[in-house]
Image (spheres, rainbow, N blue to C red):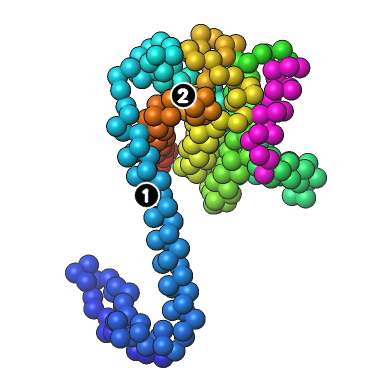
Amino acid sequence: MFKLNKKQKSKSGIEPINKLTFSQIKLSYKRSPISLIMLILVILSAVITVGVLFSIIIHILVSGIPNLSKEQFEWVYNSDNVSMMPAIINTLFMTLLTLLIVVPVGVFSAIYLVEYAKKGNRLVKVVRITTETLAGIPSIVFGLFGYLMFVTACKMQYSMIAGALTLAMMVLPTIMRTTEEALKSVPDSYREASFGLGAGKLRTVFKIVLPSAMPGILQGVILSIGRIVGETAALIYTAGTGAQIAESLGSSSRTLAVHMYTLFSEGMHIDKMASTAVVLLFMVLAINIVSSLIAKKIASISKN
């Protein structure tokens, strides 16, 4: 084994961890060529991943930005302006409505599984198997189920509420799994200290455990928002393709992703579709940034 460099104390008096010199790293890779091969493969995979991402973004920007026009941001859609503004507003409404439905159900279900259910409970196994199964179902199957269940059987017709209920089923596994992992990451000492001070189970969960797990829960919500905004297959069969701003929960409406798909399928406004893709890209980015800032703010408040 090669020797490490001498330790040097910093101004704070803490001895930093020594770093290997280039010659020592080179010698270690000579002794183990497999490690060098694995390092090259890992770096190559990272470069390919970043390259694919940037190539998609650059292609969208190059093909879409020149086709942006003021007419596409008018409040009323018609065949001349092909406005995407109603679709943008419908996307925000659909996202908010879906989160209002799915977040309480997903979070409370995870709380039951982690905090209240006994170990070895058969119901817990059934719920987890069901959650994993839901996570693997294609979105087109959710769309067909939503059409048969909400649109036809429940007579909701093509409506925003039917689309939101379908999307809620799609993102429910994500909310549940991330919340469950976040709750498990909270140390048991927090619970024991709360019980030692005389707090009950319910107060401990909602005053101690849940605030501590809030950053992880919000990460799941952010992931769910990304899927809601970009979903098309499930919404075509449930929310419909109404081009105007939804006047109520029972109105047919199209989100921005459905609007882009509709333009592509019609084949008459390919240039408008490219510009819609640019707006959708920036919309997803903006929603993620705002959600992350809110998550950090809530996390800092919960710590204090």
What residue is pinned by disc 1? 54
* Residue for point 47% across, 85% down: 32
Is residue 301 a member of the stretch shown in magenta? no
Quadrant for residue 43, please give it: bottom left
Q: Quadrant of residue 274?
A: top left
Residue at 51 percent across and 12 percent down: it is 246
* Label 2: which secondary element: loop
Residue 195 on image: x %, y %:
59, 43
Badge 1 density bin: few <14, some 14–19, many ≥20, Cα 10 Å = few
Indicate the amino acid at tag 2: Met
Q: Residue at x 44, y 14 (%)?
A: 79
- The percent coordinates of residue 166 (x first, y second) are 64, 27
* Closer-to-camera residue (296/55): 55
Q: Does 135 appear above or below 37?
A: above
* Residue that protrudes farthest toward the right in the picture: 122
Residue designated by label 2: 268
Label whose residue precedes the other's in the sequence (1 or 2): 1
Q: Residue furthest front?
A: 268
* Amino acid marked by disc 1: Phe
Quadrant of the drawing holding the C terminus: top left
Is residue 104 at all visible to an observer of this figure? no
Q: Which residues are magenta?
A: 136-153
- Residue 1 seen by the camera: yes
| Residue 296 vertical placement versus 253 (above, below) | below
Q: Residue 4 sits in which quadrant?
A: bottom left
Which residue is drawn at the image coordinates 43% and 79% (left, top)?
Answer: 36
Badge 2 density bin: few <14, some 14–19, many ≥20, Cα 10 Å: few
Quarter of the image for the N terminus: give it: bottom left
Residues 260 and 2: in front is 260
Give the Cα separation between the discs numbered 1 and 2. 28 Å
SS type, badge 1: helix
Q: Residue furthest top?
A: 247
